[in-house]
Amino acid sequence: LYSAKCSDVDENGVQYMVLCRVIMGNMEVVCPGSKQFHPSSEDFDNGVDSVENPKCYVVWTMNMSTHIFPEYVVSFKF
């Protein structure tokens, strides 16, 4: 829902999202508003806001081409 609210609307009122399969690996907690832009150690692959109940996921730039696989483009109107 958050992603849908943040997506742009085209001239026909249609919005688009890309749904991806993501390999998260070992996750570390990254606090909301953090300026962290890479893992704190080699032990972590990516970040989450909460390990027990994640709602926000962070894929570090160094892992983007190997950990993200785009699967679908979804178009919709709110």
Image: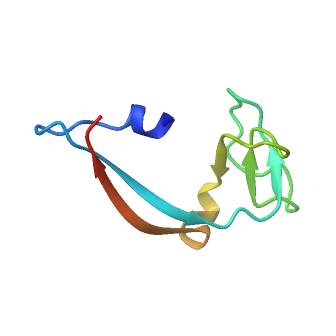
x, y (%) of residue 48? 74, 45
**Left or right: where 26 falls relative to 55:** right
Q: Where does residue 38 sit, x and y in percent of width and height? A: 71, 50
Q: Residue 53 vs residue 77: left or right?
A: right
Tell me the quarter of the picture where residue 61 sits.
Answer: bottom right
Q: Position of residue 46 (x, y in %)?
A: 73, 55
Query: Farthest residue toward the left?
Result: 11
Taking the spot 66% from the left edge, 41% from the top edge, the residue there is 56
Report the quarter where the C terminus lies: top left
For the residue pair 34 and 48, the one nearer the viewer reads as: 48
Decide: is 77 above or below 42: above
Image colouring: rainbow
- Dividing the picture into quarters, in which one does residue 70 lie? bottom left
Q: How many marks?
A: 0
Identify the residue at image location x=35%, y=38%. Answer: 7
Q: Which residue is found at the position 17% from the left and 36% from the top?
A: 13
Residue 71 in the image, given as x and y percentages of width and height: 44, 69
Q: Nearer the viewer, residue 27 or 14?
A: 14
Q: Residue at x 59, y 73 (%)?
A: 66
User: Is residue 12 placed above or below 58 in the rendered structure?
Assistant: above
